[in-house]
Every structure is written in C-alpha cells, then in structure tokens.
C-alpha cells in the first residue's frame, strides 16, 4: 500500500499463511493438493469442551468479560500450572488473550522499546521476528544446526548478550524443528540469563502437551529466574482448539498489568464462549490429549522413514510438536524447464506446482537451507504427499 505506515513496512506477511492461501487457490482450481504446511491438529475439539461452549451460549455468557479473562478461567490456568508444572502463580499473574499469538505480542510490546535487542534462536516461529519488528526492537538471531537438534548452547547465548539485550525468546517444544530442551539445558540457559538483571525470558510453551520423550520442562521452574520469565501458552494445540483463539501468559503482576493495559485498548477480552470452553479443557482429564499425542508420534515416525528415503534430505528426530525440518540444500542449483531452484522458497513452490504438496520454506523460520513439513494430518495424506514429493524430485534429478 502506497501510504502505509512505517510500522507496517517493518513487518512481512506470514509465509505459513501465505502458503496455505496458495494451496487453497490451487484446490479451488480443481487441483488435489495435499497440505503439509498447516500447523494445526486435524482432530475435532473434544465433545465435553464443545458442550461447555453450547451451555455457555444457552446461559447467556455473551457479554464483555474482564480484559484479563474470567476469574474462573484464570483460576483454572493457575491450577493447571500447579498440577502439571509444579509452578505457583496467582490469578493476577495470568492474562487471557485472543490466542497465544496475541499473548506473545502483548509480552513483547510490554517490555521492548526502540532499539532493544531480543535474542531469537533460529529456526524460529515465523511471527517472533515480526512481532519484535512491530515493537521497533532489534532481532539478534542465534543460528543452530541439525547436528545439535536445532538448540542453542549457553556459550552462544552468553556471547550474544549486550547491554541492549531485553529478552531471550524461544519455544520448547519448538516450531518448526520440534526440538525439546531438557531440564539440564534449560538450567544452563537460566544461569546465563541470571547474570543479566535487566533481561527477560519469553518462553513459548504452546506445544507443551505434544512431547514424545519426557514430561514437559518449563524454564520457570528455577526459582532464581522465575520472576523474569514470561510463559506463553494456550489451548490451541494440546486440546485441538485452534479456532477458539484462547492463549494466555503467566508472569509477574507488573508485566501482567502492562499486558492488560495494552490489550484493553486494542481487543479487550477474548471471546466469552471460548473462555468457557477453555475452562472445560483445562479442568478436564488429558485422555484426549494423550491420544492425540500418541497419534502424532506414529505419524512422525512414518514421515521420518519416508523423508529419509529421499536422496538429498537430512533429518534429525524431532522430540515434540508436529513438524519435521529436513535440510534440503542439495537440491539448490537444480533446474526444471520453468524454474531454477536457488533456495528453499523455490523448492517449496516447485513441490506445490509439480507435486501439488504444500510445505513451508525454511527461510520463513530463519533457516533457508530447510523446509518444514507438518504431520498434523492423516497418515494417508502423509504417505501420498511424501510419495509425490519423492517422484517430483527424482524427475528433477533426471532433468539435469
């Protein structure tokens, strides 16, 4: 837009949503597109959660709520932290938002001033860098490698910190790599941050319940750093509630109050009906969540086996979330009649046009040598999608 604000010019369109839109356009043209780009469970929201929403409508919970959310929901979140994470919070430390994305934006916009630095390990979720750009902060990217399961080391972090560093922003389990930090690794990171009294940790834990190796570990468990940790979480992934848009933060009362002040001006409360549904999700048992987790693990193993059979792909074993992030740079420089594949964006577009399979280029996540595959879809689609990709890439090799 010609007269758009400087603020708008600082941010980019989400490449995950852009790829989803392009695949939808092909579907509307009659193409049988298999979408391995979207990051949402393909399971329906559990019945007891839907019933809670229906009951809320019938009981006329259709009015404004407190900006921070219903007291009952914030109490359910407090109870969840104690029950599942052994973390103690009060309801004045909880703020409910319109999805974890808004909760993350609230956190960043509440603590970052112009020129402040946020350390972001790469690969990172697409919106991290753009939210920091919106806050007029400076992104300091820390590259990781497939050999280290895409995780930073304490030494890397220590070297990256400057007097302008305001926060470390990371996720575990991570999107896009599925990396899970161990308790020992988190402790070592926390000890580094402890040395810098004006530095926060924004810990994105939205994939908490999709973890294949151990009980979820939160960096807020270490008392010496807890008052400088902002936990971002929500119900989207663990309870198959992506469209309900309920996220939340747990933090100090002061930062929570800042987030309430900010949110009160640009959205006010999250949907009242969704909040009632989230109460049922958090207070219910985790049988449905555990079932999804088991299904995702089976799909992960299938996808890894199929991807490892494609020449030129290098994968690690992701321990959480529902993504595989293989290195694909061996295909860069290859030529099809209508395209020269220079990077992961070109390769993703090639796979969409040639194989009718939607993926997301690693450049969207700060690692241009990789592509993200989501296995949050049926086993049948995974098998068919990877078969198409393998066939398209074999034909690309033959074209040389």
Image (cartoon, rainbow, N blue to C red):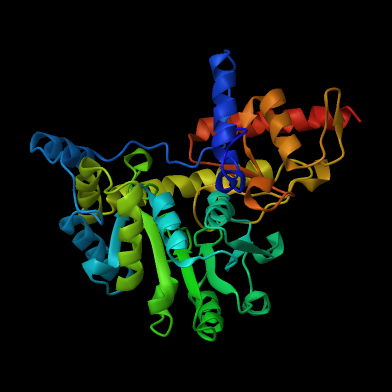
Q: Quadrant of residue 152?
A: bottom right
Q: For the point 62% across and 37% down, which residue is it? A: 359
Q: How many numbered discs?
A: 0
In front: 244, or 372?
Answer: 244
Q: Is residue 213 above or below residue 127?
A: below
Q: For the point 51% across and 76% down, which residue is it? A: 199
Which residue is at the far top?
30
Residue 223 position within the rendered picture, expressed as x and y whole percent measured from the top left: 38, 83
* Residue 147 visible to an observer of this rendering: yes
Q: For the point 68% across and 49% down, which residue is it? A: 326
Query: Does residue 90 appear left or right of residue 321 in this picture?
Result: left
Q: For the point 35% across and 52% down, which residue is it? A: 290
Query: Does residue 333 appear left or right of residue 227 in this picture?
Result: right
Q: Quadrant of the N terminus?
A: top right
Q: Is residue 323 above or below residue 316?
A: above
Q: Quadrant of the C terminus?
A: top right
Residue 236 position within the rendered picture, expressed as x and y whole percent measured from the top left: 37, 47
Q: Quadrant of residue 23?
A: top right
Q: Quadrant of residue 79?
A: bottom left
Query: Does residue 132 appear left or right of residue 390 in this picture?
Result: left
Which residue is at the far front?
3
Q: Is residue 19 above or below residue 90?
A: above
Residue 358 position within the rendered picture, expressed as x and y whole percent measured from the top left: 61, 32
Query: Does residue 312 appear left or right of residue 298 in this picture?
Result: right
In front: 227, or 236?
Answer: 227
């Amino acid at each position: 837009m010609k007269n758009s604000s400087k603020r708008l010019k600082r941010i980019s369109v989400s490449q995950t949503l852009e790829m989803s839109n392009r695949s939808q356009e092909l579907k509307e043209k009659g193409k049988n597109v298999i979408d391995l780009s979207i990051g949402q469970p393909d399971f329906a929201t559990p019945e007891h959660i839907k019933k809670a929403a229906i009951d809320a409508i019938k009981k006329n919970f259709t009015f404004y709520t407190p900006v921070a959310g219903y007291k009952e929901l914030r109490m359910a979140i407090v109870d969840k932290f104690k029950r599942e994470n052994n973390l103690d919070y009060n309801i004045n430390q909880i703020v409910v938002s319109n999805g974890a994305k808004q909760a993350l934006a609230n956190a960043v916009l509440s603590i970052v001033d112009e020129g402040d630095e946020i350390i972001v390990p790469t690969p990172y979720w697409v919106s991290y860098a753009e939210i920091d750009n919106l806050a007029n902060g400076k992104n300091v990217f820390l590259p990781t490698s497939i050999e280290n399961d895409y995780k930073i080391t304490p030494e890397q972090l220590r070297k990256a910190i400057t007097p302008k560093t305001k926060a470390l922003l990371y996720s575990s389990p991570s999107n896009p790599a599925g990396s899970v930090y161990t308790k020992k690794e988190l402790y070592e990171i926390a000890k580094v941050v402890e040395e810098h009294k004006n530095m926060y940790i924004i810990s994105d834990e939205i994939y908490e319940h999709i973890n294949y190796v151990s009980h979820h570990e939160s960096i807020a468990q270490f008392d010496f750093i807890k008052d400088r940790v902002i936990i971002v979480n929500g119900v989207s992934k663990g309870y198959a509630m992506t469209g309900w848009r309920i996220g939340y933060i747990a933090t100090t009362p002061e930062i929570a109050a800042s987030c309430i002040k900010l949110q009160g001006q640009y959205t006010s409360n999250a949907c009242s009906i969704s909040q009632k549904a989230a109460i049922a999700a958090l207070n219910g048992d985790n049988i449905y969540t555990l079932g999804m987790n088991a299904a995702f693990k089976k799909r992960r193993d299938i996808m890894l086996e199929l991807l490892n059979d494609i020449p030129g792909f290098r994968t690690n074993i992701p321990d959480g979330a529902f993504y595989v992030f293989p290195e694909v740079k061996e295909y860069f420089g290859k030529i099809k009649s209508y395209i020269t594949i220079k990077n992961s964006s070109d390769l993703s577009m090639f796979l969409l046009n040639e194989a009718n399979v939607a993926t997301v280029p690693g450049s969207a996540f700060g690692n241009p040598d990789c592509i993200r595959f989501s296995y949050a879809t049926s086993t049948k689609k995974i098998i068919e999608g990877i078969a198409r990709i393998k066939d398209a890439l074999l034909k690309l090799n033959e074209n040389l």
